[in-house]
Amino acid sequence: MPDNSRLGKFGETIASKYLQEKGFKIISRNFKSRYEEIDIIAVDNSTKSDQTGETLVFVEVKARKENSLVSPEESITPDKIKLIIKGAQYFKILHPELPDLLRIDFIGIVAEEDKENFKLKKINHLKDIS
């Protein structure tokens, strides 16, 4: 598997575990629509206690090696966010039973390469980036 694919898979796995530890319920990974592939779709149960109820969250994950010239956060663009919104709307049409409140989050992963594996150096979760 090419290095970028391995790093991407590593980042998505770390992000999924992180979200689950924060109380999110993972609904789907790598959902493909004609608009965009959404890395992680989850329900945020932490919003259930307030008056708004649960939130359906669409998560873009970017992983970079620690010596990369571009940070994960610098790789998310307004055009990318627009595509994620379209993909999220399509997913919601397919799954009307899921929460009506929608949010787009970003998780940036910085990893250290250790021989043939990656090790987490930093994780940054940005909520509601749209």
Image (cartoon, rainbow, N blue to C red):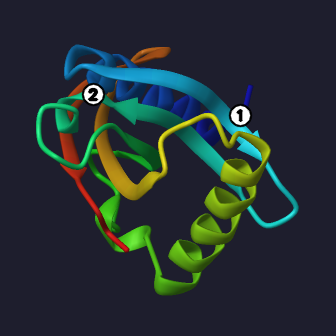
The local secondary structure at tag 1 comes to loop
Q: Classify 10 Å Cα crowding around label 2: few (below 14), some (14-19), many (20 and above).
A: some
Q: Classify 10 Å Cα crowding around label 1: few (below 14), some (14-19), many (20 and above).
A: few
Residue at horizontal 25 percent and vertical 25 percent from the top: 120
The local secondary structure at tag 2 comes to helix
Instruction: Give yes or no for contact between labels 1 and 2 (Cβ–Cβ under 8 Å).
Output: no
- Provide residue 31's location: percent of width, then percent of height: 72, 40
- Provide residue 114's location: percent of width, then percent of height: 35, 18
- Provide residue 90's location: percent of width, then percent of height: 75, 58
Residue lying farthest to the right in this orientation: 34
Residue at horizontal 71 percent and vertical 49 percent from the top: 91
Report the residue marked by disc 1.
2
Q: Which mark is residue 45?
A: 2
75 above or below 8? Answer: below
Callout count: 2
43 above or below 127? Answer: above
Residue 94's quadrant in the figure? top right
Left or right of residue 32, residue 73 in this image: left
Query: Which tag, 1 or 2, sits closer to the chain's start?
Result: 1
Q: Nearer the viewer, residue 86 or 4?
A: 86
Residue lying farthest to the bottom in this orientation: 78
Left or right of residue 37, residue 33 in this image: right
Residue lying farthest to the front in this orientation: 51
Residue 39's quadrant in the figure? top right
Q: Quadrant of the N terminus?
A: top right
Instruction: Check disc 2 and give the amino acid type.
Output: Asn
Residue at horizontal 33 percent and vertical 37 percent from the top: 54
- Provide residue 33's location: percent of width, then percent of height: 82, 54
Instruction: Check disc 1 and give the amino acid type.
Output: Pro
Residue at horizontal 47 percent and vertical 85 percent from the top: 78
Disc number lying in front (1 or 2): 2
